[in-house]
Amino acid sequence: MADASFITAVPQQPERSSAREYKDEINELEALVSGVTQTSQSTLLLKKKREMREVSDNLAYMKQQYLERMKACDEKHTDFERKQLEMKDSVIKFEKFIQENDAKRQRAEMRHKEEQRKVAQKEDELRNLKEELEATEKEREKLQKELSRLNRYKEYLDNTVEHSEEGVEDIEDILNRLTTLENANQDLMMLEGQTEIEMDAIRKERQNFMVETQNRILVQNSKVHQCQNQLERLKATSKMGRDEEEAKQDRVKDVNRENGQIIMAIRNLYGRCCSATRTKMPPFSDRWVGNAVQLDKCLTFIEERIVDLMEIEEGYDDQQ
């Protein structure tokens, strides 16, 4: 990591530090060669060749070091770009994580607000329920007092049921009877009201009728006198009619008496024939008295029975 921080640092060489210094040394050597007169050209040439070779070796070494450092720099740059991409990916992921957290936070805030709203609603409901509970408690206390007050009536009804001799089995029968009597009382009250209304109407009609009747009486009185004379004449005629009617009624009574005797005889004979036969016949009914068809059937049955009895008697005599 120290090398990455000093990419352009000059390598530590014992002889040269840069190309500029090499050039300065060459210039100094040329000045020295031109100024030296005692040294031979060959010796100087060899010396300079050796120095040039050293300079060339140093330059090649520096180039190699430069290439290696540039390669390391490229590698570090590539690694830096890779790390930068990784960092960008991390930033993108982190931003997504932040966005998700923001969405979660918003949802949590909305849920919190909704829960606060629900809590407020529940508090209102709780307050209303408490009020209803207080009202219910008051109503319960009121009903409890009413129950305590009505218990004595229940005890009275229990004693009534216990000592009742009319077949009362429980309190419900008494209450049903009370309800029936109350309904009947209401019906009678309504009927009384309607009757009063009808009576008022009848009184008015009666008053009007009395007035009309008095007027009619005055009119009829004048006709009564006329009718009295006519009545006298009709009385004589009526007396004659009554005498004839009485004679007629006497004749009718005689006929009815004879008919009654005949029907009584038919009844007796029909009853005796029904009791002596195995055939199931309907009993004689009073409705048959005025029914000639039914009486004829009874006489036919009696006749058939008498014929049967006569045949039985003849058969018995023949057997004897």
Image: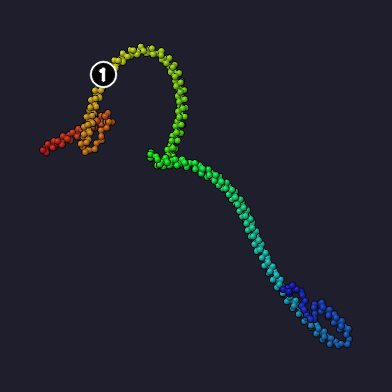
Q: Residue at x 82, y 86 (%)?
A: 46
* Residue 2 sits in quarter: bottom right
Amino acid at the residue labelled 1: Ala
Residue 245 pos. (x, y %): 28, 18
In the rendered image, the quadrant that contains the C terminus is top left
| Near-viewer residue (21 or 196) | 196
Left or right: residue 309 versus residue 131 is: left
Picture coordinates of residue 298 (x, y %)? 23, 32
Rendered view: 194 above or below 80: above
Query: Image height check: is 107 above or below 255?
Result: below
Residue 70 appears in view: no
Q: Residue at x 23, y 27 (%)?
A: 261
Q: Residues within 10 Å of mark 1 (few under 14, many from 20)?
A: few
At x 80% / y 82%, what residue is drawn? 52
The residue at which mark 1 appears reads as 247
User: Which part of the image, by quadrant, shows the N terminus?
Assistant: bottom right
Q: Position of residue 289 (x, y in %)?
A: 26, 29
Furthest-left residue in view?
Answer: 320
